Image: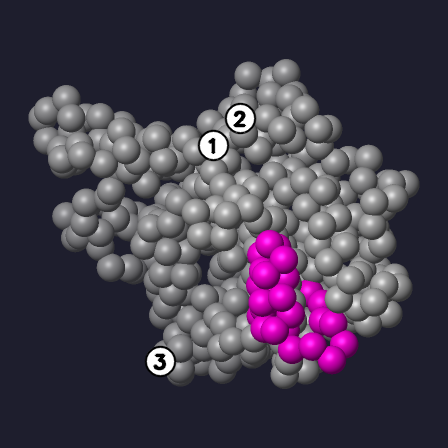
Amino acid sequence: MDNPQEQLFRPPLLQDIQSRFAFVDRCPFLGSRTFLDSASGSLRLKEIGKIMEQQACIADQINRDTPGSRHVMDTISRGEDDVRTFLGSSGTVVAALTATAALSRTIRDAVAHFPGSNVVTTTLDHPATHDSLYRAAEVFGKEFRTADPCPATGTVQVDTILQEIDANTSVVALIHGSNVTGAYLDAASIVRQARKINEDICVIIDGVQYAPYAPVDVDEIGADVYVFAPYKTYCKKGIGFAVLSERFSHIPHDRVLEKPANDWSLGSADHINYAAWSAAVDYFAWLGGHFTGSDSRRERVTAAMSAIESNMTGLLDRAVNGSSAAEGLKTLEAVTLYGLEGSLTERTCVVPMNIRGMDSKEAAKIYMEQGVVVQARKSVMSSRQLRGMQIAEEGIVRLSAAHYTSPKSIDRFLQITAELTGGG
C-alpha cells in the first residue's frame, strides 16, 4: 500500500458513521472533547441505548409458555447467532459478566481437563489471560511458561511462542491483539504450528483488543475458545462472549446436570445484552453494505471489519507519519515511540509513547486539559506488559483510535504534542 491514508473513510461515510455514535466530540463531563481512548472502552452506538430502554422492563423469563417468554428466548437465540456471525464460528456460545470472567472460566476448565505438564502464554498478555492461566497452573500443578515480546515491533513472534511449547503442553492462552502496543499475534499460525507439536493441545484466544478492528474467522483459526468484549466493540458493558469448539464444549464444566453435556449456561440470561449485541451486528451489516453487494449477514460483517481494518491503518499512519495538517510523532525529537518499528499493518491504531522529561500520568492530564482524552498506562493492569516491552517505570501515554475517529482528531493530538515538545 503506497499511501495507507488513502484507505481512510471518505468524509460523507465518516459523518454517517459518527452520527450513529453517542458522545463523538463532546461528553456530559468534559463538554467538547476529542476521544482517543477507545482501547479502554469504545464509544457506544446510539441504538444500544434505545434497545435497552425498549427491553429493560420486560419481566418474562425463559422457558415459559407466554408470548413474552418466547420473545426473550428468540432474542437470546438471535444474539447467540450474531456472536457466531461476527466471529465466523459454528461453536457453542458462552456468556459471562465480562470477557475476563469468560477467560477465567474457560482457562480454568481447560487446564483441569487437558493432559500435559505445562501451560504457555506471553508476558504481553492482558491479566485476564496471563493471571487466569497462572492461577490455574498453580491450582492444578502445571509449569507456567511465558514468551516475551519483541520490544521493537510490539508483538510476540510465532517462533518465540513455539519455543515454549512441547509435547507436554496442555494449554496455550494468548491475546490476538495487544491493548498496550496495538500489534497483532498471528493466531492462525500459532494454532497450526502448535498442533504439529501436540495435536491435542488446547488453544484459547483473547480477542478483546482485536475483534473490534479486524475480521475474525474462528473456524479458520482453529482455536478451541475465542473471547471478546462487546463494550469494546461499540455495544455495552455487562457481558462478555466466548465461542467454544465442539470438543471443548463437551469437557467437564460447571453446569446444570439435567441439561445437555455441552450446555454452559448458568441461570437465566439477561436478554437485553443479547438484543444490544444484535443491534451492534446490525450496524456492522449496515456498514458492510457500503463495501459489498452481498445479502449475507456474515459477508457484510466481514466487509465492514475489513474496511475498518484498512481505515485504522490509515489513522495509525497519520499519527506516526503525519500529513499536510500536522507533523507525525516520529518527527518529534522529544517523543519516544514503542513497538512501532517496521510495517504499520498487522496492528490497530494504538500508539504507545512518551514525551521526554514528562511523567505519563502528567502528560495525559495535560492532554485532557486541552480537551483530548488519552490514557496513561501505569498501573497494576499494565506493569507486567510494560516490563516485557522494556519500558521504564514512567509508563506510557497511549493514543487509541477507532473507526469513528476522524483524521482531524488525530491532527489535534499531533498539534498539541508538537506544542508540548517544542516542535520537531
Q: Position of residue 106 (x, y in %)?
A: 38, 60
Q: Quadrant of the C terminus?
A: bottom right
Residue 159 visible to an observer of this rendering:
no
- Please report the bounds of the magenta region as a residue range: 352-377
3 and 2 marks in contact (CB < 8 Å): no
Q: Residue at x 41, y 31 (%)?
A: 47
Picture layout, residue 298 above or below residue 241: above
2 and 1 marks in contact (CB < 8 Å): yes
Q: Earlier in the sequence, mark 3 or mark 2?
A: 3
Which residue is the site of mark 2?
A: 285
Amino acid at pointer 2: Ala
Q: Residue at x 72, y 71 (%)?
A: 354
Tell me, for residue 281, which label it has, or none: 1
Mark 3 vs mark 2, CA separation in Å: 43 Å
Amino acid at pointer 3: Val
Task: Please tell me whether mark 1 sits on a helix, a strand or a loop.
Answer: helix
User: 10 Å neighbourhood of mark 2: few (<14), some, or many (≥20)?
Assistant: many
Q: Is residue 357 magenta?
A: yes
